[in-house]
Amino acid sequence: MVNVIIKEQVKNADVRSHWLEARNYVHDHLSDLPSDIYGPYFNDRFDDVYGNIYALTSDSFTYEEMRIQAEELKRQFYTVKDVRKVELIGEQPEKIYIYMSNDKLAKLGLSLTAVESAIAGETSVTPAGNADINGDSVYMRLTGLPNSTDNIRNILLNSNGKTFRLGDIAEIKREYPDPPENKMYVDGKPAIGIAISMQDNGNNIELGQNLSKMVTRMKKELPLGFEMHQVSNQPEVVKQSIDEFTESLWEAIVIVLVTSLFT
């Protein structure tokens, strides 16, 4: 992990452009990195505050099915006024694992490097250009890659003049990573969290009211077997703080008036 800290004298209006320069600098030097490096991945939005967090749980659906449902809820949350960003928490992305026997590879005259090269040739992701959107550089990648176990099984291998499928010599499974990614639990149940941040200069209390209306509708439309919970409610905390301040203010005014009258 590499942390980049902007100097304090940089104006707020120039912060985003400086992050963009840092991204461009890294992308200009990607060719200097080893070919088997993944990333680099950027996080220049770590200052977002997620004041509203909801959790999706289920006793009958898998993590992937919960993630798909959470993605749909995420899309709907973006339609609410003053919502700036929506992120999912506790996702457990499925991965495709390939199990091979060294003895079988030796009998066929295949090396692990040759198998890796064949798989890499069929699954490599090649950038297809980029677009500049609101100061952020978004990279395009080609679709149509083999993303199912059947596609992976049908990758062709050549050895000693013979051609056969990867599925003939290997076991291909779609599984969750072990050890798992960071998980989220609600009342002891695995959950997918949906974290929401507010637009700059937005009204926190109004946002909470609008989200409450949206969540009420969402709960009615959720498929049977899903449950939705609210984990964090910053608008309610803000409202309580304002109510407490108002109450204290009126008490102070009454005390001053009563003291003045007696005096």
Image (spheres, rainbow, N blue to C red):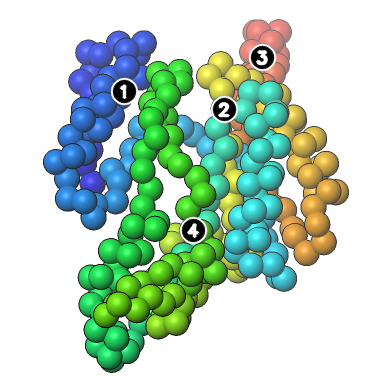
Question: In this view, which residue lies farthest toward the left?
Answer: 32
Q: CA distance from mark 1 to mark 4?
A: 32 Å
Q: Depth-wise, is mark 3 or mark 1 nearer the camera?
A: 1
Q: Which residue is mark 4?
A: 146
The picture places residue 257, in percent across and down from the top left corner, at 69, 10
Q: Which residue is mark 2?
A: 84
The amino acid pointed to by label 3 is: Ile
The picture places residue 51, in percent across and down from the top left corner, at 56, 36
Q: Is residue 263 visible?
A: yes
Decide which of tag 1 and tag 4 comes sooner along the chain: 1
Name the residue: 60% across, 61% down: 64
Name the residue: 70% across, 28% down: 80
Q: CA distance from mark 3 to mark 1?
A: 52 Å
Query: Could you say whether the residue bearing mark 4 is in a helix, strand or loop?
Result: loop
Decide which of tag 4 and tag 2 comes sooner along the chain: 2
- Label 3: few (<14), some (14–19) or many (≥20) C-alpha neighbours in 10 Å: few
The picture places residue 67, in percent across and down from the top left corner, at 61, 55
Q: Tell me if label 3 and label 1 are in contact, CB under 8 Å.
A: no
Q: Which residue is mark 1?
A: 20
Within the image, what quadrant is residue 199 found in? top right
Left or right: 37, with 223 as reference point? left
The amino acid pointed to by label 4 is: Pro
Between residues 57 and 171, which one lies in front from this camera angle?
A: 171
Give the position of the C terminus as an image quadrant.
top right
Q: In the picture shown, does residue 36 fall above or below 258? A: below
The amino acid pointed to by label 2 is: Arg
Q: Which residue is mark 3?
A: 253
Decide which of tag 2 and tag 1 comes sooner along the chain: 1
Q: Tell me if label 1 and label 4 are in contact, CB under 8 Å.
A: no
- Label 4: few (<14), some (14–19) or many (≥20) C-alpha neighbours in 10 Å: some
